[in-house]
């Protein structure tokens, strides 16, 4: 149950961060780079919560 809650919180935080990046008043290239960073951090966080490494 704890792993499920951790995964749901991680997905929620990543979705929130992606939404907030879209609202930033910066050019599209920087938005795209910020989105990639958020997704990579989210994937690493999910893998660590699943004890993949």
Image (cartoon, rainbow, N blue to C red):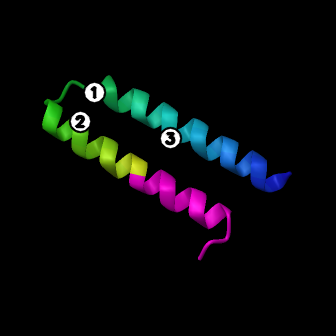
N-terminal-most mark, 1 or 3: 3
Residue 14: mark = 3
N-terminal-most mark, 1 or 2: 1
User: Element at badge 2?
Assistant: helix
Q: How crowded is mark 1: few (under 14 residues within 10 Å), some or many (20 or more)?
A: few
**In terms of image quadrants, where is residue 11?**
top right
Question: Magenta includes 34?
Answer: no
| Residue name at image x 32 percent, y 22 percent | 23
Image height of 7 relative to 29, above or below: below
Marks 1 and 2, how far apart in space?
A: 8 Å
The residue under label 2 is 31
Image height of 28 relative to 5, above or below: above
| Residue name at image x 44 percent, y 55 percent | 41
Left or right? Give the position of 49 relative to 27: right
Q: Give the range drawn in magenta.
A: 40-53
| Residue name at image x 44 percent, y 36 percent | 17
Marks 1 and 3, how far apart in space?
A: 16 Å
The residue under label 1 is 24
User: Element at badge 1?
Assistant: loop
């Amino acid at each position: 149950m704890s792993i499920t809650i951790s995964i749901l919180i991680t997905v929620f935080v990543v979705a929130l961060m992606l939404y907030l990046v879209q609202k930033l008043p910066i050019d599209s290239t920087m938005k795209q780079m910020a989105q990639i960073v958020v997704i990579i951090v989210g994937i690493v966080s999910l893998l660590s919560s699943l004890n993949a490494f």
